[in-house]
C-alpha cells in the first residue's frame, strides 16, 4: 500500500527539469553518468553541462520525454525514466560498443519486450518518503498502456537499499553479469536484472 501521508505531484518531465534530472540520474547511476559525461564533454564544457544537455534531448534513453518527476512543495524530489524495450534484442557489436556497456546491454536484451526502468532516484533528503514506490506504480501503468510484457530494471548488486525497494514492489532477479568498471569506482561486482 502506498503511503499517502506525504503529498506529492507526479508529472511528466519538461526541458526545464534538466538540472534535477542530471543530478538524479547521477545518484541512480552511482557516479557512472558523471564519469561518462566527463569523457563526453567538449572543450569548455563541464560534465554537468553534458548531463543537462542530454536530459534536454528530444530522443534517447536519457531524455526528459522518457522521464516523470515527483514534486514536493513545487520542487523536483525524485524521478523515474523508462521506456519500452523492442521485442527483438539489440545486436551487440563489441567492436563499437564500449566494454562497460556490454554487460548492461546483455541484461537488457534478456528483458526484450518489457517496459524498462532506466533510472529511479530521489534526492537524499527525500528518501524514505515512498516516492520511489509511487513512481514504480506509475511505471506499471505505463507498461500496461504500452502493452509491454512486464517491467525490467538493472541495479548494482551493492545497492542494497534499491534492491529492497524493488523486491518489496514485486521484482525478482532474473540474471546478472560482471561489471566492467574501467576507472569508475563502485563497490559492486555485478549488474543484476530484476523483472516483474
Image (cartoon, rainbow, N blue to C red):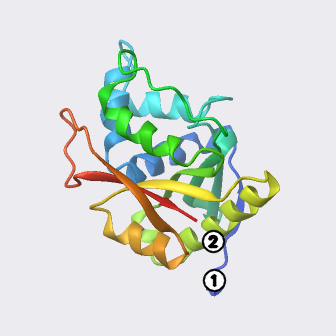
Q: Is residue 135 left or right of residue 186?
A: right
Are there few (<14), some (14-19), or many (20+) residues within 10 Å of tag 1? Answer: few
Where is residue 46 shown, x and y percent of the image?
A: 37, 26
Does any portion of residue 72 appear in the rendered image? no
Where is residue 7 shown, x and y percent of the image?
A: 67, 78
Where is residue 179 shown, x and y percent of the image?
A: 27, 44
Front-lying residue, 154 or 11: 154
Which element is circle 1 on?
loop
Q: Earlier in the sequence, mark 2 or mark 1?
A: 1
Q: Which residue is mark 1?
A: 2
Q: Residue at x 31, y 33 (%)?
A: 100
Q: Is 191 placed above or below 36 here? A: below
Q: Residue at x 32, y 63 (%)?
A: 159
Where is residue 147 shown, x and y percent of the image?
A: 79, 53
Does any portion of residue 108 appear in the rendered image? yes
Which element is circle 2 on?
helix
Residues at badges 2 and 1 in contact (C-beta under 8 Å)? yes
Q: Is residue 18 left or right of residue 161?
A: right
Front-lying residue, 45 or 141: 141
Real-space CA distance between mark 2 and mark 1, rounded to the nearest whole angstrom: 7 Å
Q: Which residue is mark 2?
A: 134
Q: Is 172 placed above or below 20 here? A: below
What quarter of the picture does the N terminus occupy? bottom right
- Among the 4 quarters of the image, the one containing residue 48: top left
Residue found at the far top of this picture: 43
Amino acid at each position: 500500500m502506498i503511503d499517502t501521508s506525504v503529498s506529492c505531484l507526479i508529472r511528466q518531465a519538461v526541458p526545464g527539469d534538466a538540472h534535477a534530472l542530471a543530478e538524479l540520474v547521477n545518484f541512480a547511476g552511482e557516479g557512472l553518468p558523471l564519469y561518462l559525461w566527463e569523457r563526453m564533454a567538449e572543450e569548455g564544457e563541464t560534465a554537468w553541462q553534458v548531463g543537462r544537455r542530454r536530459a534536454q534531448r528530444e530522443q534517447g534513453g536519457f531524455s526528459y520525454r522518457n522521464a516523470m518527476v515527483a514534486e514536493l512543495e513545487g520542487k523536483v524530489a525524485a524521478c523515474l525514466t523508462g521506456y519500452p524495450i523492442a521485442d527483438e534484442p539489440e545486436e551487440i557489436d563489441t567492436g563499437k560498443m564500449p566494454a562497460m556497456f556490454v554487460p548492461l546491454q546483455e541484461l537488457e536484451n534478456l528483458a526484450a519486450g518489457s517496459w524498462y526502468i532506466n533510472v529511479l532516484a530521489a534526492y537524499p533528503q527525500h528518501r524514505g518518503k515512498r516516492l520511489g514506490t509511487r513512481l514504480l506504480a506509475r511505471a506499471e501503468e505505463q507498461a500496461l498502456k504500452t502493452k509491454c510484457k512486464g517491467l525490467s530494471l538493472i541495479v548494482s548488486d551493492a545497492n542494497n537499499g534499491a534492491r529492497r525497494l524493488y523486491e518489496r514492489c514485486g521484482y525478482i532477479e532474473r540474471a546478472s553479469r560482471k561489471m566492467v568498471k574501467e576507472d569508475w569506482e563502485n563497490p559492486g561486482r555485478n549488474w543484476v536484472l530484476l523483472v516483474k
